[in-house]
Amino acid sequence: MSEDPVIELRGASKRFRSGSGGVHTAVRDLTMTVARGEFVAVVGPTGCGKSTTLSLVSGLEPPSDGEALVAGRPVDGIPDGIGYMFQNDAVLPWRSVLDNVAAGPRYRGEAKAAAREKARDWVARVGLGGFESYYPHQLSGGMRKRVALAQTLVNEPSILLMDEPFSALDVQTRALMQDELLRLWSGSNAAVIFVTHDLEEAIALADRVLVMTAGPATVKASFDVPLARPRDVEEIRLTAEFLEIYREIWESLKEEVEETRARGAGRVA
Amino acid sequence: MSEDPVIELRGASKRFRSGSGGVHTAVRDLTMTVARGEFVAVVGPTGCGKSTTLSLVSGLEPPSDGEALVAGRPVDGIPDGIGYMFQNDAVLPWRSVLDNVAAGPRYRGEAKAAAREKARDWVARVGLGGFESYYPHQLSGGMRKRVALAQTLVNEPSILLMDEPFSALDVQTRALMQDELLRLWSGSNAAVIFVTHDLEEAIALADRVLVMTAGPATVKASFDVPLARPRDVEEIRLTAEFLEIYREIWESLKEEVEETRARGAGRVA
Amino acid sequence: RDSRDTGSGASTDVKIMVGGIDKVIYLPAKLTEQLGYFKDQGLNVQLLTEPAGATAENTLISGDVQGVVGFYDHTIDLQTKGKCITSVVQFADVPGEVEVVGAAQADKIKSPADFKGRKLGFTSPGSSTDFLTQYLATKNGVATTEYTGVKAGAGQTFVAALDQGGIDAGMTTDPTVAQLVSTGKGKVLVDMRTVEGTKAALGGLYPASSLYMDCKYVNDHKDVVQKLANAFVKTLGFVNSHSAEEIAAKMPADFANGGKELYAKSINDTKPMFNRDGKMKAEGARNVLDVLSQFSPNVKGRKDSVDLAKTYTTEFADKAAG
Amino acid sequence: MRGEPDVSPEASAVLAAPAPVRAPVSVASAVRRRRMKIWSIRLALVVLWLGSWEVSATYWIDPFFYSKPSSVWQRLVDWFSSGTSQGSIWEQMSVTLQEAAAGFVLGALAGVVLGILLGRSHLLSDICAPFIKAANAVPRIVLAALFVLWFGLGMSSKIATAFVLVFFAVFFNAFQGAREVDRNLVNNARILGASRFQVLTTIVVPSATSWILASLHSAFGFALIGAVVGEFTGADRGLGLLIDRSRSTFDSAGIYAGMIVITVIALLAEWLITALEKRLLKWRPPAASAEAQI
Amino acid sequence: MRGEPDVSPEASAVLAAPAPVRAPVSVASAVRRRRMKIWSIRLALVVLWLGSWEVSATYWIDPFFYSKPSSVWQRLVDWFSSGTSQGSIWEQMSVTLQEAAAGFVLGALAGVVLGILLGRSHLLSDICAPFIKAANAVPRIVLAALFVLWFGLGMSSKIATAFVLVFFAVFFNAFQGAREVDRNLVNNARILGASRFQVLTTIVVPSATSWILASLHSAFGFALIGAVVGEFTGADRGLGLLIDRSRSTFDSAGIYAGMIVITVIALLAEWLITALEKRLLKWRPPAASAEAQI
Ligand SMILES: Nc1ncnc2c1ncn2[C@@H]1O[C@H](COP(=O)(O)OP(=O)(O)OP(=O)(O)O)[C@@H](O)[C@H]1O
Ligand SMILES: Nc1ncnc2c1ncn2[C@@H]1O[C@H](COP(=O)(O)OP(=O)(O)OP(=O)(O)O)[C@@H](O)[C@H]1O
Ligand SMILES: [Mg+2]
Ligand SMILES: [Mg+2]
């Protein structure tokens, strides 16, 4: 695992116009780096600014202040080799499952047949073999998520941003996808930022877990996960080491979540 | 807890036209009942037909075969007193958070001021106090889910259908919402069908957990959860009773999930 | 439909539709207003305009207007459709139309006998210009199927059509004729603005420009019609006793927007067509019927059933002159 | 079980066994019954309308203005059996149809291309918007007259008139359609590696398709109107001229007959466009749940 | 911390302290710069166009047909300083504007109401669709002539012509807009207790708003055209008559001047509609990320 930062945010902030016309700061003074081949999980209270952070890295939104760098260069436009699985549905409703997954390779200039062959392989890997000709509206929520996953992974990105990719899946399918993700990643030297609400998932997958503060988001703490790889996601959860890290991160996260809850529920009697 | 079935499905099936023009059976010969005041959790492999089942009960889709009854009468149109929180986003993009939550009472003829007052209370209960004037596109994924939750609960439904309502929330917010849901429900005598992928959540909340088969869905097994109420969701998970039930259900569910996985991944080498 | 009644509220209120208020052949309409002769008669006349002849008659029949300034031959046409329309003041005994040939074709088309295989323009199919063209052609031995009739409209589109070869020759009125001749784009082939010219071309008179009204209205409002006739006959007198420049000066300025000299020239060229007394010549009316009965689909074969006496009256013009 | 789960074994059984096939069959027959019903209502409406027209034209209103169905029918029979005074009716129809079709194709293409380009480029649209809106406000009959000056009396001036009418109808929809594209989809495509041009062709165009198709529904009608207006301004053949002739000869039956011929052509074109729409939008969830469910 | 989280303490600080306020200010100035740029490009285009017109009309093309900007300007000055032969230019404008506005309002209302009703009712739309499409194919100038018969020569026949033009433009969009409504939203509203009518007013209408607004952009132009066409068919006042007069007196400067006056009116109306659009669609994510971000 080399140590040159592929992804770097330097004092990045992001402000939006708020509902009532004021200013809403979603991310404030955020500094973080992700090295080549590093798998970083991000956890934080809901609504704190995790998705916004990813959008800064992906180049879809420019930071209001500070800098976002990818591969050492300031982000303007979409950096090369990036893959981003959005939190909400973004599959093309007018394309079948197969053509949705084949979209990336086609965009990158591959021939139709080759792209479809690749896509067919990935559709099967996410467990949708047989559904190739379905349109998104004919799929269940979890199935659509998996189409998006295949769509992202088929491009073999060197930087992978994932926003709660597995939240709509049942436990076992989720485990299967996690294994698939780790398998792909381990051979690829890709940098991964993985947003999740499932702390176990974060620890099981990542080299490092970042805890975000209550919104506006900034990095509160960073925890290394010194578990050996390759990991068996199912097994690892029962080890003492795992539970130790879990408790540690949970303590840190809990404060922020409580802070958020205190604010949001401020009105409840 | 009385025993007259409020919700009843009798040999219900649902077929769709499939992607390639064939027939896709989402639900087959499904029989289940939910009594007044009963809280039923439904678990099953992703894509098996859980959401479809809820749509049959809600009257949004008629069964292809068999019958759906609510309060003893066959469902045609939306039954009275029903609340349904969809799996995917369905908040009105052109209304602020407050007006989204006030929609239900307004539809049911309440005065604007009263509806808003109620809505304001519920917005705070789901932890969104202060975001009343935001439009949905200005919210995070988890926040939108909570708007939908408030929108459903503010109507105080006597039949409550929830499709993975808490999947986008962090653990603590989720626990908070679960408590809130139980508090509301316990005073209401409402019948609840709660779809989730989180078996712990299912057991912690429900009187009964239904395990669905791999698609086409039908009820594989029903497990009573004899844990005492009121329950503290956080505490209960550590009891031996809980773990026992968990294991039992997990065994049953696992087979179905594996069956699904075997089918979907049929193509992977 | 209530708008219909408002016009005839007071019996001195008269609406007149002009089939092209800026056409020189219909000049007496606007000129009378400009000279104030309607007011002198105690009439409150509102002039409306409309480019296509048929719509004008339709509004007359439907009662939206009380009079139309247009071609006399429509009264015959309409009689075959069971409508009684009568010309009360006849401005001219000749059509005022001119067959103009494009400069490029001027040496090849020397008379209507050369129409064979040509594209001939008229204002509108089924209009008087169409019938007159057919008459000219057949009279000179060219069957109507041997040339192509083209709708070329009037004004600029006509000029452009002739200029660009869309038509080889065409029938139109002033100021289009003056425009074409003065710019050298066209040459007059058949001039029906004078009695001599018309007789030479058609073998008789062809009364056209006139004020006609619904028979029933004429009967019910003889006083109003008389006043109208008085005004128009007076205007005809003015036209006949003044120079083109003097007449042009009386017209609204923007009628001469295309050029002052041009406008004066058009009036000068067309002026001879107007008669002095506003009376229909019986011979002219018969001639019109003759032409129509050959070419108008409505009149064809019904010549004998047409009662010419109902299509015009000199009663009012007689009184006005006297 | 390769490629099987889409049609589960049970479903295949349903399709194979005779008895349960009843479901799809009964759907088909329900669809047929519905179609029957719709057609009979339509027919009833037409009959009612024609009947009341005939009766009132016979007893109350003046057929000089309003004609009546029987005379209109007579005129149509005349035209189709013995031709019109301008020659065969088929020729008139083909002339007008050619003009309209050419104007339609060119106008729709230009409208779609410009609409989408301007819809996606804020600078371009900010600059051009007022000009296009201004151009849209220019009365088409004035334009028709100008086109005769510019393009002569031939077909091209009619095509130009049809073009202008179609262009604006399509342009505004294509423009808005291109603006309404879901940002998520565009972002996703960009992340997946789509170039600006690919985003345009694979995301924007399909998203705007329903907008564009909506405008095409009325556009062919506009194209026909353009051709007719052009013919009114100056022509030697065509349906517009036929109507104009009827007008000048006080032949109201001819006017209505001409309008009916045009309408029938428009309906045929419409039917083609609807077929195209069905093909292009087959990815959609069917609107009526009756269709989705078997 | 009641009602605070929306503007977090930091953000309020940003707004209060003078230095960091720089950000919003520079956005405002960027917006101003952009607007300047756009206006100057527009101006340059207009100047270029008028210039080349003037030059070519002076040296190459025939100003008899094409007029030239200086004469058009002269004509406009004439009209506004000394009036027209039909009376003051303001009166002509007000007549045409009244006709257009009345036709616009009525046509838009009818189009929206019918479009949405038919868009939501499959039976109704199946029955009526062919009739509406047929009606849409009827040439408007023929209709204008018929309207004179039906409604007389007054304003009402012009309003009717404007109405017809506006109605169809709006109808087809409202119809499609009503069909495109997200089923999820409708389902959710029904579950929340909305009656059919409430679904219509709270879900369908807002969803279709962008469709309807898109059609309104071109509709006022159509209304003006309708009024002008109506005036062509028979009138004693109005801008259409002014143009018609210019046409038959070979005053091409007058034709263009009339067109310019109409265009300016249309642009003013357009500006009003855009303002309305901004108000109605303020819930949208801003299209340019430049606006969203501060
Ligand atoms: N376009 C926007 N305009 C205004 N506010 C916004 C906008 N986008 C996001 N926000 C605000 O920024 C904050 C962070 O949003 P973000 O989507 O990054 O949260 P998140 O951490 O991903 O939450 P979740 O776990 O629920 O997905 C939220 O409070 C949200 O209201
Ligand atoms: N409109 C439709 N047309 C065709 N197939 C459909 C349609 N809706 C659902 N299906 C199919 O029905 C099956 C069940 O879908 P459903 O949404 O009920 O699953 P689910 O159990 O809710 O899954 P998840 O946990 O992923 O949400 C899926 O295989 C899906 O492809
Ligand atoms: Mg998020
Ligand atoms: Mg589901």
Image (tube, coloured by chain):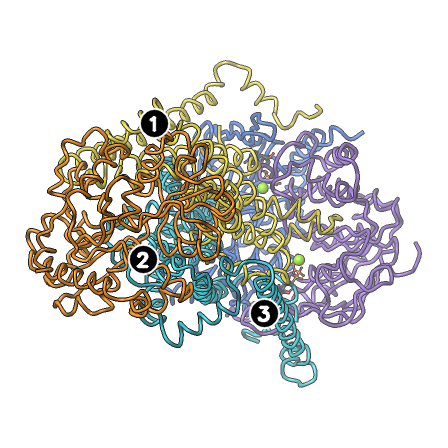
Chain colours: A purple, B blue, C orange, D yellow, E cyan
Choose top left, top right, bottom left or bottom right for residue A140.
top right
Residue that sits furthest to the right in the current view: A2
Residue B118 is at least partly visible in this image: no
Residue C278, given in percent of the width and then of the height, sits at 17, 55
CB-based contact (under 8 Å), mark 3 and mark 1: no
Residue D186 lies left or right of residue C136; in this view the side is right
Choose top left, top right, bottom left or bottom right for residue E19.
bottom right
Which residue is located at x 69 percent, y 81 percent? Answer: E20
- Please tell me which residue lies in front, C307 or E184: C307
CB-based contact (under 8 Å), mark 1 and mark 2: no
Instruction: Mark 3 and ligand 1: say if the CB distance to the nearest ligand atom is below 8 Å.
Output: yes
Residue E219, given in percent of the width and then of the height, sits at 43, 55
Tell me which chain the residue with mark 1 is part of: D
Label of residue C24 in the image: 2
Task: Give the residue number, with chain letter if any, for mark 1.
Answer: D79
Tell me which chain the residue with mark 2 is part of: C
SS for tag 3? loop
Q: CA distance from mark 2 to mark 3?
A: 69 Å
- Please tell me which residue lies in front, C70 or D79: C70
Q: Dot 2: within a 10 Å radius of its alpha carbon, few (fewer than 14), some, or many (20 or more) residues?
A: many
Q: CA distance from mark 3 to mark 1?
A: 68 Å
Q: Is residue C32 above or below residue D60?
A: below
- Please tell me which residue lies in front, A165 or B74: A165
Task: Give the residue number, with chain letter if any, for mark 3.
Answer: A18
**Number of marks in the image?**
3
Residue E268 lies left or right of residue D1; in this view the side is left
Under mark 2, the amino acid is Val
Q: Is residue B171 above or below residue D203?
A: below
Residue D169, given in percent of the width and then of the height, sits at 49, 49
Which residue is located at x 68 percent, y 53 percent? Answer: D187
Q: CA distance from mark 1 to mark 2?
A: 37 Å
